[in-house]
Each structure stands twice: as C-alpha cells, then as structure tokens.
Amino acid sequence: MTYPSVSLLFPNRDNERILDLTLERLLEHTTYPNFELIVIDDASTDDGLSILRRWRDERRFDNFTLLEREHSGVARSLNAGVEVASGDLLVQLDGDATVESPAWLERMVSFHQSDDRVGVVTPLVTFEDGRIHAAGINIVSEKGMHDRGTRPKEPAGQRTFHSIAERMTPKEAGSLVTEPAEVDSSLGVHMLFSREIYDELGGYDEGFSPVWFEDLDLALSSRRLGYKVFFVPGVHIVHRRTSAAIAPLTPSAGGWRSACAVESPQRSRSVCGARSGRPSRRTRPIARTSFAGSSTITSTSGRSGVGT
C-alpha cells in the first residue's frame, strides 16, 4: 500500500463537552504515517478554543494546525481549512464525532485507491445509543432523501423532515453495514475524497451556510466528474451530538427547521441535478484567496500567520 498525503479537516464550534474525547480517540486510532490535522474553530462561544490551543501547544499530533476564525459557518470554515492543507486526499471530520476503529485511515485510503472511479468514501456513523446515523445517504429514491440505514416514518410525498425516521442498529442492518456499497452521497461527519475533486468542483458551496447539505452537495456533485460514492465497512464513527448540534435534528427546532424546509430543499433540487447530468448551480466559484472573515493560523509544524 502506498501512503498519499492526507489532510484531516476538523471544523469546530461549541464542542467543549466532547473535544478532548474526540481528539484522544483520533490520536489513538490514527496510525497512518502521512497525515496532518487542520482544526478550524468557527468562533466558539464556549471554552473549546482553549482546549484546542492546549492540544496544539502539547504537540501530541506531529502536524497540528489551528485556524481561529470569525463565525462564518461550516462550508466557509472547511474551505479555509483546505486553503492551508497540503494533502492529496482530504477527510472531513466533525468536532463531536469520535473515531472508534484502529487503522481507520489506512482502510479508507486503501478503498479509495482500489479503483480510479472511487471518488468519495464514507464509513458507518452511529449515535451514542447504538442506532445508525448513516451508512451513506440515499437521495434518489422513491422514499426521498434519508440516511441509509434508516426507514422514513412519513409516507412518500408527505414527508416534512428528513430526520423523522426509524433508525436500525448495525445488527439489524446486517449486510447493509458489513458489505461495501455504492451510495448516492455521504455524511460530512466523516468522509474522504481527493483534493482533485475538491478543486474541480470549486470547493464546498458556501450557499449552504451556516450548516447542512454542503457535504451532500460535494459528494453527490462528484458524480458529474465521473466518480462514485461508496460506503466502506470496517470503520465506525460515533456521533456524540452536542447540544448545539442536536437542535437541527429536532423537527420542532423552529429556526433550523424553517431554514431546512424552505431554503435547503430548493438548493437540494439543484444538487440532485448533478446526478442526472445537469450543471451544478453553485452560489459562486470559490475564491481561493478571499474567504469571508479572517483567520489566525498557528501550527505545530512551524506555520503561523494571519489570513483574510
């Protein structure tokens, strides 16, 4: 196996409760010999930034870069992270999701390298109670968009919220989570793809700011370039949702639901056009030298500076 360089992108906002555990598990289970960790703090209002500075200063990761940014949302944070990344492959992580599988990165890189048509690779993500969050995402289906490994509770054509679903356990799911499978898209809690795909697509679409669907958009849009998205078994991620992250998954969360019920479905229809070969209608091309807000960058590898 060859070891292409990998940049782990770790966006964070208000995950103080879980940050130490998330980073401890990442350090414990990441044995891949050629990676860097880029953490992007999106103006956390809790004590998370202090935790991240401590991890940077302790130098437990050989290559740990911390970007301290004004609040701009996940898509812009990820784009800012890629701007300083050096890896040939990129992995989108989540600040409140723990890696539970040793040698996880070797397995995902190996699968990605197994065929030139593999564009995006995503693993099994469960919640803390053991139920499946997603094993890939189903978008083009009679039931409508839903996390693979779930069963929508509302009738097709009458659904009001994509998270209203019955969630299986991995045991109940059987071969759905033990065998590789091509899927429509990927959950941004954890997914791997090439820098080449990112550049060709123009990065994460910032029109999905502040959060949600930027991950589905990038993965599904990779199909326009002739690539495929795959679920890969053998890697387990636990999404330990913080209080800030729980609200969007709750149908009664007024503001979040309004955003997802009004704006995001319209954007999602343009995203789904990628599957049928129609051009992707991104908000605007990503300006490689101009991201909203400013960043303070510090690194265990000696890089430091201020970007705008």
Image (cartoon, rainbow, N blue to C red):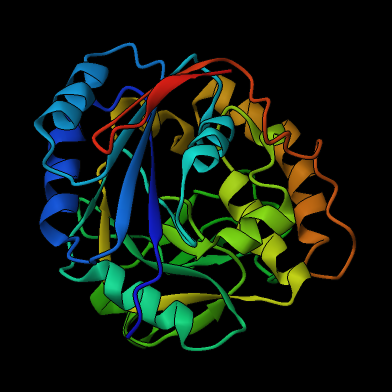
Q: Is residue 210 left or right of residue 298?
A: right
Quarter of the image containing the N terminus? bottom left
- Relative vertical location of residue 142 with respect to residue 189 in this rendering, above or below: below
Instruction: Look at the image and tell me whether residue 216 can be seen.
Output: yes
- Quarter location, residue 168: bottom left
| Circle count | 0
Q: Residue at x 70, y 71 (%)?
A: 142
Q: Which residue is drawn at 19% across and 51% down?
A: 26
Q: Is residue 216 left or right of residue 107?
A: right
- Quarter location, residue 100: bottom left
Residue 104 percent location from the top left of the image: 25, 69
Q: Is residue 234 left or right of residue 73?
A: left
- Relative vertical location of residue 163 with respect to residue 6 in this rendering, above or below: above
Instruction: Look at the image and tell me whether residue 169 can be seen.
Output: no
Viewer-closest of 147 and 228: 228
Residue 302 percent location from the top left of the image: 29, 33
Q: Which residue is drawn at 68% across and 71% down?
A: 141
Residue 244 percent location from the top left of the image: 36, 25
Quarter of the image containing the C terminus? top right
Residue 117 percent location from the top left of the image: 62, 83
In the current view of this chain or complex, which residue is farthest to the front?
A: 302
